[in-house]
Amino acid sequence: MKKFIHKQRPSNTKALVSLVIPFTEFGLAVLLHTALHSPISYILSQLLLGIFFFQCFILLHECGHMSFFKSKWANQGFGHVMGFLSLIPFTSWVEIHNLHHKWTGFRDKDPTTEGTVNPKFSSFTKALVNISWRLYIPLFTLGYRFGNYWNLEKMKRHLKSKNIRRIRLNMIVQLLLYAGIIVLVNKTLFFYVLPAYILSLIISDLVILSQHSHIDIPIAGNTPVRPIRYSDQVIYTRSITFPKFIAHYFLFNFNLHEAHHQYPSLPAYYLGSAIIAKSNAPGFIEYLKRYKSLSGMNFVFNTKDKLKTP
């Protein structure tokens, strides 16, 4: 199987085919906005646009690995567009996400999980975390995006100065573009885009938190450690199972997180063929029932999973 996996190279054709559904959703959402004027058409358009925005985040992820298209320039160019639509600077995404893959297996070394180690929260913050998790308020995704990819202080601790300069420039350009759009189309933006974007954050909250939360991941502390090889990172990840059609065409196999960590450079459209020897992959409904029964503080910050299936 490993030989088969490594033969799979990026395909522009497969990448373009993967874009058919998200941009069809976008076109239908615009059509429903402009051609029909009813509460039902508005709700449907927001649902389609919400799914589209979540798919933009997944496509940002794929382009960040430089494995969606054949060309590095195509991945970078499309990645910047998807980053813009996801409210994440592409340059900071690439740097921080690469460190995530490097240090998965050590919770305090991975910049995306270091904040889960011994958090010193007030009673109010703990209550907010619990309420948000219970009521599907996407507090975690907001913290994940802004706390990791807009946080220059964190990046200064992990990255070189030359990378910080490129990230800062990306941030400035992106913020200027956002400001211009808000000034030009503020009413349209808040009525037709904001509800859909909030929906995309809710979806993102459920999927992203499934990938590493409530899994027993060691803490390096002051002990010198080396990065864990990709094939050994699988035990520190979780996949969630969807019907194959939905997983492949709507989620671009983003739910197959164990396979992704074992083969991080494998294009997403091939991940469904990857075989994981020992899989932690509950069905989506099972995952919701199992972990929504926990408090938000327990699920996100307690890594001892007493609810794992034997």
Image (cartoon, rainbow, N blue to C red):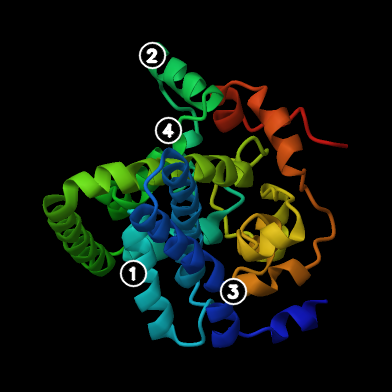
Per the image, the residue denoted by label 3 is 265
The answer, for residue 182, to whether it is visible in the render is: yes
Residue 152 x, y percent position in the rendering: 25, 51
Quadrant for the C terminus in the image: top right
Q: Residue at x 13, y 55 (%)?
A: 184
CA–CA distance between discs 2 and 1? Answer: 37 Å
| Lower sequence index among marks 3 and 4 | 4
249 relative to 128 in the view: left or right:
right
Q: Nearer the viewer, mark 2 or mark 1?
A: 1
| Lower sequence index among marks 1 and 3 | 1
Per the image, the residue denoted by label 4 is 139
Residue type at mark 1? His
Per the image, the residue denoted by label 2 is 124
CA–CA distance between discs 2 and 3? Answer: 41 Å
Residue type at mark 2? Phe
- Contact, CB < 8 Å: mark 2 with mark 1? no
Per the image, the residue denoted by label 1 is 80
Dot 4: few (<14), some (14–19), or many (≥20) neighbours within 10 Å? some
User: How many numbered marks have been drawn onto this rendered protein structure?
Assistant: 4
Residue 233 x, y percent position in the rendering: 67, 56
Q: Residue at x 55, y 60 (%)?
A: 101
